[in-house]
Amino acid sequence: SQTIHQWPATLVQPVGSPLSLECTVEGTSNPNLYWYRQAAGRGLQLLFYSVGIGQISSEVPQNLSASRPQDRQFILSSKKLLLSDSGFYLCAWSFQGPNYGYTFGSGTRLTVV
Amino acid sequence: AQSVAQPEDQVNVAEGNPLTVKCTYSVSGNPYLFWYVQYPNRGLQFLLKYITGDNLVKGSYGFEAEFNKSQTSFHLKKPSALVSDSALYFCAVRDIRGYNDMRFGAGTRLTVKP
């Protein structure tokens, strides 16, 4: 069966510091991968998605970037964090094709101070 | 582009009463529809989906949803609510033409009171 791992669970970082959140999927190959941000326990904002190694699509211009160095690894990064980057970050994967749902990781609570 | 709306930010029900969480959608073609549940500080968990076939879809934890094409709705229902059902619920839609992302509603917070 497939599993998704996301870490760390919580992170407190000072303004201006770098960020690296990692997400890995096991038990499948060539998944679609996604990064979402959720503010204040409400709606989801799609940040990036990837349909293959090195293929990244950005939905919203911002202070963040994403990379997919391996088939089942998806990394969210920032060179300099802003206060507004605080939030709950969720990684997800799905099989290729629109009839599949997403499977989400457990999330990372990022607080920028 | 596809979109989904959840008209209620908050739904309150008493334990043992039926519950409904509303969702309407907009897509160019035939929709793929999903419901997810999120507990505090956790990721979203899949509840059920409609792809094709029977309009009444049964899912996890006793939840079901009814697809209504004429009203473009996919409301989530449960005959008897539990306090443990209290959570944030998201409706989502994907377009059958194969977009690589899913559109989520803003979420509805369900509170079940004992």
Image (cartoon, coloured by chain):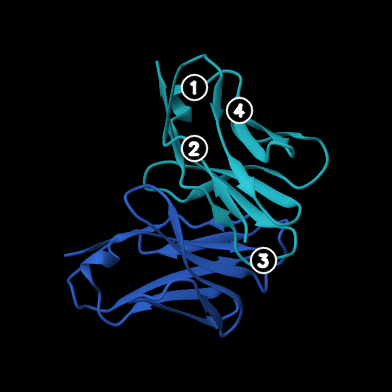
Chain colours: A blue, B cyan
Q: Check disc 2 and report the residue beneath it.
A: B7
Mark 3 touching mark 4, by CB under 8 A? no
Q: CA distance from mark 2 to mark 4?
A: 15 Å
User: How crowded is the residue under tag 1: few (<14 C-alpha within 10 Å), some, or many (20+)?
Assistant: some
The secondary structure type at the circle numbered 1 is: loop
Q: Check disc 3 and report the residue beneath it.
A: B99
For image coordinates 61% across by 33% down, the residue present is B75
Which of disc 4 and disc 3 is earlier in sequence?
Answer: 4
Which part of the image, by quadrant, shows the C terminus of chain A? Answer: bottom left
Q: CA distance from mark 2 to mark 1?
A: 22 Å
Residue A33's place in the image compared with B74, above or below, is below
Task: Give the left or right position of residue A108, taking residue B46 as reference.
Answer: left
Chain of the residue under label 3: B
- Residue type, numbered disc 3: Tyr
Mark whose residue sits in front, 2 or 1: 2
Residue B2 in the image: state x and y as whole percent.
Answer: 62, 57
Q: Check disc 4 and report the residue beneath it.
A: B77
